[in-house]
Image: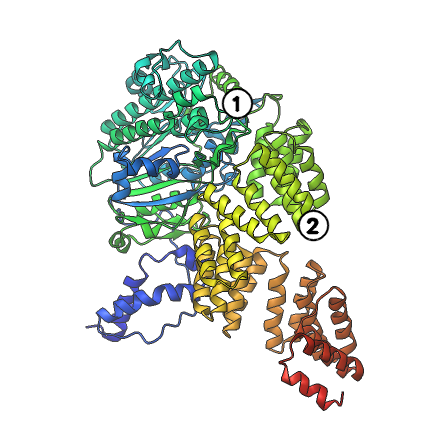
Amino acid sequence: GQGVRGAVRSAIEVAATGLDGGAARALGPDALGRALEGRLREELGRRGLELRRLDLEGIDTLTIGSDAALPDPGTKLLVVGLDGADWAILDPLIESGRVPNLARLVRDGVRAKLLTLSPMLSPVVWTTIATGVEPNRHGILDFLAQAADGGGREPVTSRERRVPTVWQILNDAGISTGVVAWWATWPAEPVDGYLVTDRVAYQLFDYRSNPDDAGGKTWPPELYDEFVRSRIEAPSSVPWDRVATYLSGPPRGPNGFDADDEKRLEEFRTLLASGDGYVAMAKALSQRFSPRFEAVYLEGTDTVGHLFMRFRAPRLPGVDAARFETFRDVVDRYYEQADRYLGQLLRNHGDDWTVMLLSDHGFSSDATRPQSTDSRIGHGAAAAWHRRFGVLVLSGRHVRKGVRLDEASVFDVAPTILALFGRPVPQSWPGRVLAPALDPAFLESNPVRLTADEPTLDRADTGRVASAGTGASEALLHKLEGLGYVSGESKQGPSISLSNNSGVSLLAEGRYAEAERTFRDGLARDPNQPMLLVNLGLALRFQGKREEARKVLLGVLDRPTATRLAGNHLAQMALEDGDLAEAERILRRVLRLEPDAAEIVTTLGSVREARGAIDDARALYRRAADLDPNAAPPRNDLGNLARRAGNDADAERWYLAAIEADPYFMGAYNNLALVYQDRGDLQKAIDLYARALERSPSNAVVMNNLASLYYARGELDEAARLWTRCVRTSPDYASPYNNLAGIEIARQRFGEARPLLERALAIDPKYADARVNLAIVELAEGKPEAAIRQLEAARSAGERSTSLLNTLGEAYARAGRADEAARAYRDSLALDPSQSDIRARIAGDGR
């Protein structure tokens, strides 16, 4: 009854529901148009209309205020955090039926690998998960913080967090919440519901929270005495018979171990007691308060890895045979216990609940395990055992069934939680709503909304939050020092670990100069910290300060906790400099300590390839790929070898395998797009680049290459838009300046092209294409001698392309230097004899 306009409007509303707003902002009208077109064609067909063509000329991102009145979908959500859980351990357990609760969630829902961030430390990552923002924004960068009285340092508290958590944002919308054991929640802040902090149970080794001290441990405060204290489990209450069920080999009593293993098993008792206590509290409080959002954190899956992962099969070199036989199954059996905890938590949550299970990072459990450092915290570089992909499962109400997401990030968790409750997502958050995991019918009724408002933290109730208990903080501080999470340097001023972690976070954001300053601040207090030195070396390398970086990295190459990372970067720099013998010497030295380090094997493959030993390189790349299922570089390198051999089918297969292993590895997208370009399938290449930009919206190389494809198709406006964005994103990247100048030249706007080319050459004086384009500008402005100077400078630097030589020939001809013009044209024909127009020029000139 509303005519064609009404039918079109209705079809658009349905077709656009659930489209990723983040992709729209990142990619622009062209990409969004492609995403919309198929769905719109289907919806129009249902209304008796045929879509012939869709032109989308621009996008306005519609936002609402964060306090806007929105329909409440009535969502109830349980979030369970399993620290350090890894699919490499879980998948075999799922297949063998040993973790039935998790298996059911996966079968009935969505699974994904969850990309973590740097630094991979629990308080840092779990606070990002809870707040949706980067560590440098939320303020939790370490296990320690400056004490409120300024007199020293204390274990990190909720006071250091500068932004609200997702449960506080939900509280502001009138949604009740319950949180148990989440990192950096002590002292407890006021919530609508309940909060049990991370300092209630015996969660971390050797820390004994005084059960008589209720200060700041719960909200509301009276909850501690009424509900929580009686459910705290002491490690001594865990019977030996229960501990023994996790052990293998000949049975032994509690006194049948040496002092080192006795401590290990006592720490294991601690994690069992902690898990029992927190799960009991979560169950009881859920029944009493009935919140709509619940979050429960369980630390044991990470701790058990640090205690026993060295003993998991296959047996590592240097691992005592008797210990291996006793402890080989502890990790997997504890994962079964974690699944039982999950079952207990699920028992109170019916089909009307959504369930989210996730980990903050993965944990090395196979041949990739470090061999030169103990997995135990305090006995080596414990964080070196963490892997960059954790686990994510979404299941239950509002979730699609039996779906595997290509990728997800810890930044995506908070936006997805808000979307499930129908709340707007802040535009400034780096993550996106995981819309492909959600039921389309739910998204149709509750479309993802964005807000320009920034969530703010209300500290009005700070006076009601208990002060830190000096004794408890001191006890936890000593415990963290003993575990090796923090160093025992002077308690005054910022900690060494804070300097390191803050610098690592800046490195991850590409802020290399700031990272360098931060690492140097830490080294001023302790000049011999190996990881500070390694990271300083990386910051220097990424800024192009190669000699200084090499000196720093060589200085820590013999330090066991630094050898692997420092050696890999030193070898890569030697490879870049053409010193292949030195690169190989360093890598083989590292491999004597870490024979199964996949990244070292991959770099050695690159060195062997550069030395012409292609079969060696191929074998090394295959070995690295077999060692690490999440390693994209060796798979990408195998694709490169196949492509050079003319086998595009194998190249495509390996590039796709690299993307599956690590959906955030941009090199494989670029290389696969080149395969599609060679086939003449520009649209497929464009779609692939669009996928890459969804995962890495600020990747300048991908943006530049995608714009080049639009340019090749004659879509100059779309190319110019992307290149302009590329310049804003990476102002020191020369290529987009040159390419934007190419568009201006094509439009005969030579005055606009000149400053772009001059900027490109200021960044990279050896950039031959930019010199050719600048010569074209000089010719257009009647300055052939200036053009000749540009082109001869490029030729002196070794550039010998036909475009350069042909432009040089024209410049010489316009300058009246016919003999030199002819020589330039003949040099061009020597490179490509098929240039009939150039041959005609020479013939027409009589030379």
Q: Is residue 372 visible?
A: yes
Q: Quadrant of the C terminus?
A: bottom right
Asked if labels 2 and 1 touch by Cβ distance under 8 angstroms, the answer is: no
Which of the pair 92/770 is nearer the observer?
Answer: 92
Q: Residues within 10 Å of mark 2 (few under 14, many from 20)?
A: few
Q: Looking at the picture, how far across and down is residue 9, in whole percent?
A: 29, 68
Above or below residue 752? Residue 93 is: above
Q: Looking at the picture, how far across and down is residue 206, in whole percent?
A: 45, 16
Which of the pair 593/448 is nearer the observer?
Answer: 593
Q: Which residue is mark 2?
A: 577
Question: Across the whole image, how many numbered discs are drawn on residues?
Answer: 2
Q: Amino acid at mark 2?
A: Asp
Q: Residues within 10 Å of mark 1 (few under 14, many from 20)?
A: some
Residue 775 marker:
none
Tell me which residue sits at (46%, 31%) in the image.
123
Judged from the image, the secondary structure of the residue bearing numbered disc 1 is: loop
Tell me which residue sits at (52%, 48%) in the image.
619
Q: Which residue is mark 1?
A: 378
Q: Quadrant of the N terminus?
A: bottom left
Q: Nearer the viewer, mark 1 or mark 2?
A: 2
Q: Looking at the picture, how far across and down is residue 549, in whole percent?
A: 69, 41
Judged from the image, the secondary structure of the residue bearing numbered disc 2 is: loop
Q: Amino acid at mark 1?
A: Gly
In the displayed structure image, the side of residue 473 where residue 394 appears, left or right: left
